[in-house]
Image: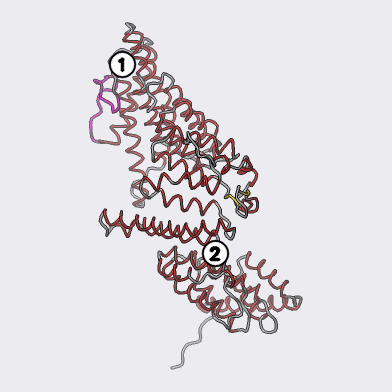
Amino acid sequence: MKEARRSPRDPDNADDVAEKNRKRKMDWAVDQHLKHMDDPFNIAQHVEATLKKGRFDEALLLVQRSSKDKQVAVAWNHLIEYKVRDKSVNAAIKLFNDMKKRGQRPNDRTYTILLTGCAKSLDPKAAVPKAVAIYNSLLKENSAVRANSFHLNAVLQVCGRAGDVDAMFSIAETADARAGRKTTAYTYTTIINALRFEAENPEKQKSQSLQEILDAMAQMVKRCKAIWEEVMRNWRKGTLELDEDLVCAMARVLLLGDKKDQASIIPLLEETMSVRDLACKNPAKDHALRMNEGMKGIAAAVGTASSAQQKAVPSTKPRINYAIPRSNTLSLVLTTLLQNRQAKLAVQYWNHFVYYYGLEPDSDNWNQLLRIYERNGSSRDAAKVVQKLPDEMLVPIMYRRALSACVNDKLNQKAFENATAVLERMTAHVAASKGTTPLDVRALHIYLKVGLSSNFHFRQVAKSGKVEEARRAYGEQLAAAVNNIWAPFTSAKDAMLKKKPKTGGKPSSKTSQMHGFAVKELVEIARNMISAVDKIVNENRLADEEAVEALKQKRNKLNRFVVEFTDPNQQKEEDLVVTKNTPMKDGEGVM
């Protein structure tokens, strides 16, 4: 029996018809374009514009037809780069092979795009043999394109990302300045970073003992030091130009070494960047000669990292240039000094970088500075930083660090005042964001902790005989702490209730987990606020009865919220009854 003829209304048949129509239109469009384009430059421009519109098939067809009678390598490069940006390395290599089959000659840029694509592959290990094979083809005598430094560095990056150290050093041995494969600062940076990342690989460390990890780290530092000796030889000869990335890469390796290695970081920066050793009280005789006044304002002068290389400052020695210290260097210095508990010296370096070099700190730099103030307990400085920074630079951890600085500054009578300034800045930031920046509930916890623990000055007043005055003042501070976080707490609670998973539905496990965490955070702070109110009421710390009554009402609402989300079946106690004081963490120094 003959197969029944497919109806035009059949869905599959309709799809086939639509696809044929699409191809017919695309063929016609490509033919029309080629009638008016003969120049490879114009073809490449048109292909680039077509790809920007997402019409890859049309661009591919146009390039394939153009390849019949002309060389259009640049147009092929656009196609390959399009696939590379999509992380489709295999598709990019397939295009590369198709390009060669059609008699097209790849150029330097073609190989750079391919190798860079391999370096960005979603599967780094699988990309290594592909990248190595492409690179090795460039080393052959009959290759029309010779491997250059860009190709060398790209393959090194592929090997480094995959953690294939053996392949990386094998490729590094092919470097040859006379053949156009000169080692650059990027070459050494890639190798040093790869060695460090491999030594710090958490997956690898799972199967190692502590001693094995330490031995591997020491071996890594030793290998990097040997590489650095080569770097310094080439730099001093004037055949290698240093940059910030390379210097910081080596310095971060030393940071993982022993105390002697860590102590050599600042001297390293002094030699390669002319960064002064601010801790040096008795400088060597040639110390002044190693400093270069031309570095003053250099970070502001270079503007961007790309222009930094063009404006390298000559050192006091002939034929060599200093690397430009910028935000990466400042980050390194702050990390080093904080690790060695030299917070005051870290602040001195901050001022040196900002006011001497003219550096504009980035968000990470500011976060590190706040971490220093947190460690130092510098509440006033932390509050000033938070107040001066624009919203786009501020993240929740910064508010927490600033408030933690206030906790650690509890001997300071102004600590609570500084914490309040931080809280006001945070709530203003949240309000200005119009819902795009959520309130950080953990910061409210820390603020309340400041209100409770910052009582040293009250105890001193009590010791002087003014016990009642001290008790009242402390009570007013606790009341202010509760009242100040009431509005943000209520906003956070309302936001949580709006996002509460609907009953009967099947919310994702991630949604349920996030909601559960939010509830836990809010319940915890509600309990702490209840504890603070109980301390005020039970110990009669406020003379203003209206203020006390307002606090009781807030306590009742807090209690209902806690009961609702901890034990829904529990009978609610009479709200107006104020329970006995519940101890609160970090509530030391009760008067």
Q: Which residue is at the far front? A: 285
User: Is 85 positioned to the left or the right of 257 in the image?
Assistant: right
Q: Are marks 2 and 1 in contact (CB under 8 Å)?
A: no
Q: Is residue 359 visible?
A: yes
Secondary structure found at label 1: helix
Coordinates of residue 250 in the picture (x, y in percent): 46, 53
The amino acid on which the numbered mark 1 sits, given as a three-letter code, is: Val
Mark 1 burial class by Cα count in 10 Å: few <14, some 14-19, many 20+:
many
Coordinates of residue 62 in the picture (x, y in percent): 66, 77
Secondary structure found at label 2: loop
Specify the quadrant of the image occupied by residue 481. Answer: top left
Closer to viewer: mark 2 or mark 1:
2
Specify the quadrant of the image occupied by residue 379. Answer: top left
Residue stretch in magenta: 569-587
Q: Is residue 21 visible?
A: no
Whether residue 96 is in magenta: the answer is no
Q: Earlier in the sequence, mark 2 or mark 1?
A: 2
Whether residue 578 is in magenta: the answer is yes
Q: What residue is shown at x 51% (from left), y 86% (from top)?
A: 5
Which residue position holds label 1? 537
In this rendered view, identify the residue nearer to me: 251 or 288: 288
The amino acid on which the numbered mark 2 sits, given as a three-letter code, is: Thr
User: Is 452 positioned to the left or the right of 296 in the image?
Assistant: left
Specify the quadrant of the image occupied by residue 129. Answer: bottom left
State how far apart marks 2 and 1 are (Cα).
73 Å
Q: Main secondary structure of the magenta part?
A: loop
Which residue position holds label 2? 183
User: Is 320 positioned to the left or the right of 589 in the image?
Assistant: right
Coordinates of residue 586 in the picture (x, y in percent): 30, 27
In this rendered view, identify the residue nearer to me: 531 or 128: 128
Q: What residue is shown at x 38% (from left), y 46% (from top)?
A: 260
